[in-house]
Amino acid sequence: MSATPLNILFLCTGNSARSLIAEGVLRHLGDGLFKAFSAGSQPTGAPNPFALRVLAAHDIETGFAASKAWDIFAGDDAPVMDLIVTVCDNAAGETCPIWLGHPQVAHWGVVDPAAANGSDDEILAAFQTTYDEMSSRISALIAAHPDTETIGDIARAIGAQAAGRS
């Protein structure tokens, strides 16, 4: 494992739910070994309140949460990413900006909890499922002790394993 924290950017379309949850989980569990970021191709402008609720329910601070455009991570003054993880199929299929440093890329498709219908409890349950999936994958990534050379292969294997369970 590298002594320098690895930068990981989670991408989805709206940057209001899945990618924010992933960012929050990695910030919480990463223990200084990782720096987590998130962004979207078409940001909604605000975090989904249910995403914030589920993070808070797990004692994850939410002050970081903001819906951001992914192009802010493509500029010359942006942090160089080691890994970019798309967490929705739309973002995985979109033409992404050219990232500084040529980071590794992986896809962790997760159902959009913001598309859930029903009562508040049912919607919150969908967000909890997303949290559980992200927490499991991020915990597996952390446990693998990746470095800049192995992080992409490890993240892709985690995504493939999760896709096989779907």
Image (spheres, rainbow, N blue to C red):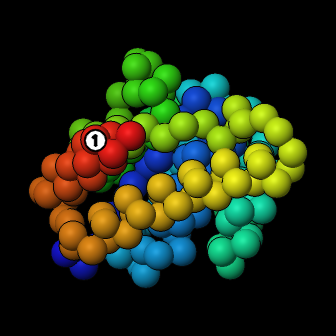
Q: How crowded is mark 1: few (under 14 residues within 10 Å), some or many (20 or more)?
A: few
Q: Which residue is most to the left?
A: 149
Q: Which residue is drawn at 55% across and 47% down?
A: 19
The residue beneath circle 1 is 164
The location of residue 27, given as percent across then percent down, is: 52, 69
| Drawn side of residue 108 relative to residue 103, left or right | right
Q: Is residue 159 visible?
A: no
Q: Is residue 88 above or below residue 56?
A: above
Q: Which residue is drawn at 18% across and 65% down?
A: 147
The location of residue 93, given as percent across then percent down, is: 40, 20
Q: Which residue is drawn at 65% across and 33% down?
A: 14
Number of labelled discs?
1
Judged from the image, the secondary structure of the residue bearing numbered disc 1 is: helix
The location of residue 146, given as percent across then percent down, is: 20, 66
Quarter of the image where one finds residue 72: top right
- 38 vs 16, nearest the viewer: 16
Q: Is residue 10 visible?
A: yes
| Drawn side of residue 70 relative to residue 79, left or right | right
Q: Which residue is drawn at 47% across and 76% down?
A: 29
Q: In the image, what residue type sits under mark 1?
A: Gly
Q: Is residue 128 above or below residue 71?
A: below
Q: Quadrant for the C terminus, please.
A: top left
